[in-house]
Image (cartoon, rainbow, N blue to C red):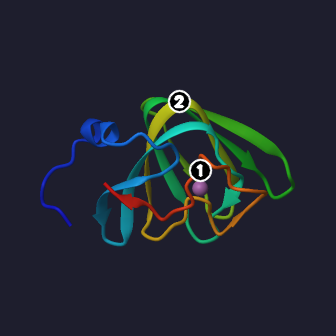
């Protein structure tokens, strides 16, 4: 736990990996994480938690799949926020961007369940230290 401020621009510039979140802050039992995004993530679901996204740079899309299999896409740009509700299958993708996420510590990037294989460019992690 640091008592120093964290600058998000500097934090984002300190690593290049995509879909490999860094934890910039912890608040109660939640993490504030940032990540670079490029390419397709994997369909996954968080059974017990919502997941908050804020787009810091570029664009970030989230495909959502309803219980009946219907899919839709939300397209987010810098400054947009969105919450994926718990239990909703989702797959992020991006042509390039960076995001901030807010979710309980220990939440896996690939959820409690995922579909298919995790691509090489997706880190299945609970987040890394900055
Ligand atoms: Ni997720």
Say which residue appears at 51% left-offset and 62% top-offset. Answer: 125
List the residue tagged with mark 2. Answer: 96
Asked if 61 appears above or below 42 in the picture, the reply is above
The residue lying at 25 percent from left, 38 percent from top is 10
Give the side of residue 118 with respect to residue 97, left or right.
right
Along the viewing direction, whichever of 72 and 41 lies nearer the viewer: 41
Numbered mark located on residue 122 in the image: 1
Q: Position of residue 114 (x, y in %)?
A: 72, 61
90 in relation to 18, above or below: below
Residue drawn at 77 percent across, 58 percent down: 115
33 to 46, vertically: above or below: above
Give how far across and how far down residue 80 sits, in percent. 47, 34
Badge 1 marks a residue whose secondary structure is loop
- Which quadrant of the rendered structure holds the N terminus? bottom left
Q: Looking at the image, is mark 2 or mark 1 nearer the viewer?
A: 1
Q: Is residue 116 above or below residue 40?
A: below
Q: Position of residue 18 (x, y in %)?
A: 50, 43
State the residue at coordinates (47%, 71%): 106
State the residue lying farthest toward the right. 68
Question: Within the displayed image, which quadrant is ligand 1 positioned in?
Answer: bottom right
Mark 2 surroundings: few (<14), some (14-19) or many (≥20) residues within 10 A: some
Q: Is residue 86 left or right of residue 8?
A: right
Total marks placed: 2
């Amino acid at each position: 736990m640091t008592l120093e401020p964290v600058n998000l621009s500097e934090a984002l510039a300190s690593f290049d990996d995509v879909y490999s979140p860094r934890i910039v802050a912890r608040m109660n039992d939640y993490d504030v994480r940032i990540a670079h995004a490029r390419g397709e993530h994997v369909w996954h679901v968080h059974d017990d938690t919502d997941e908050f996204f804020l787009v810091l740079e570029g664009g970030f899309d989230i495909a959502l799949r309803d219980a009946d299999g219907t899919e839709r896409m939300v397209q987010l740009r810098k400054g947009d926020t969105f919450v994926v509700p718990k239990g909703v299958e989702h797959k992020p993708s991006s042509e390039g961007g960076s995001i901030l996420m807010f979710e309980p510590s220990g939440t896996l990037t690939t959820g409690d369940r995922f579909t298919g294989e995790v691509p090489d460019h997706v880190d299945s992690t609970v987040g890394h230290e900055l």
